[in-house]
Amino acid sequence: MQDVLDLLCRLRDSEEPCVLATVVETRGSVSARTGSKAVIDRRGKVIAGWVGGGCAQATVCHTALECLRDGEPRIVDLDLDDEVLGTGMPCGGVMRVYVEPMMPKPKLWILGHGRVAECLCQIGALVGFDVIVDDPMAERERYPAATRLIEDDLDYRQLAPGAADYVVVATQH
């Protein structure tokens, strides 16, 4: 279990999206226990842990890819008793797996300075953004909630927002 949590922390720190799958319910003969966890990468491959093998794992991995596409968690019901209409495995049980996308925090890029930028930085951090202030006049005292200050980027070459990020130009108050 510790390796799953360590891996999740490393992936979060490197801003790598992944999925955490957790077995939340089992009945009958199944290949994983309630509480079993697995980390699935953005290619749909289990990179740590275990939530069952064979078709059960394939179904969870397929669902993980869907979760990464839309950012929404899902619960997967796996019928391990029906070879034809279930998962294709005659184990004799049922499992439910909670599949949760672990997406990098969105960034709020603030270009410029002034009271509006300072307040926006504080509010952005409060609602869960990693806030990056890009301004030659930025001072840590004015932006204590900022994740990062960029003070040497006069032509904004370090501006690199991702698809889920936001950029605000806030100059001259």
Image (cartoon, helix red, strand yellow):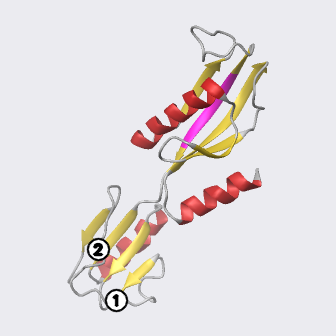
- Image quadrant occupied by the C terminus: bottom left
Counting every numbered tag in the picture gives: 2
Q: Residue at x 28, y 86 (%)?
A: 153
**Callout 2 amino acid:** Leu
Residue behind mark 1: 151
Residue behind mark 2: 159
Kindly report the secondary structure that dominates the magenta region of the rendered protein: strand
Above or below for 88 versus 2: above
Q: Position of residue 17 (x, y in %)?
A: 49, 53
Above or below for 117 versus 96: below
Above or below for 97 versus 132: above
Task: Please state which of residues 91 and 120 is positioned toward the viewer in this rendering.
Answer: 91
Question: Alpha carbon of mark 1 to alpha carbon of mark 2: how far?
Answer: 12 Å
Asked where in the image residue 40 lies, by quadrant, the reply is top right
**Circle nearer the N terminus (1, 2):** 1
**Callout 1 amino acid:** Glu
Considering the numbered disc 2 on the image, is that residue within a helix, a strand or a loop?
Answer: loop
Q: Residue at x 31, y 65 (%)?
A: 161
Is residue 18 within the magenta segment?
no
Q: Left or right: where does residue 93 sit relative to residue 83?
A: right
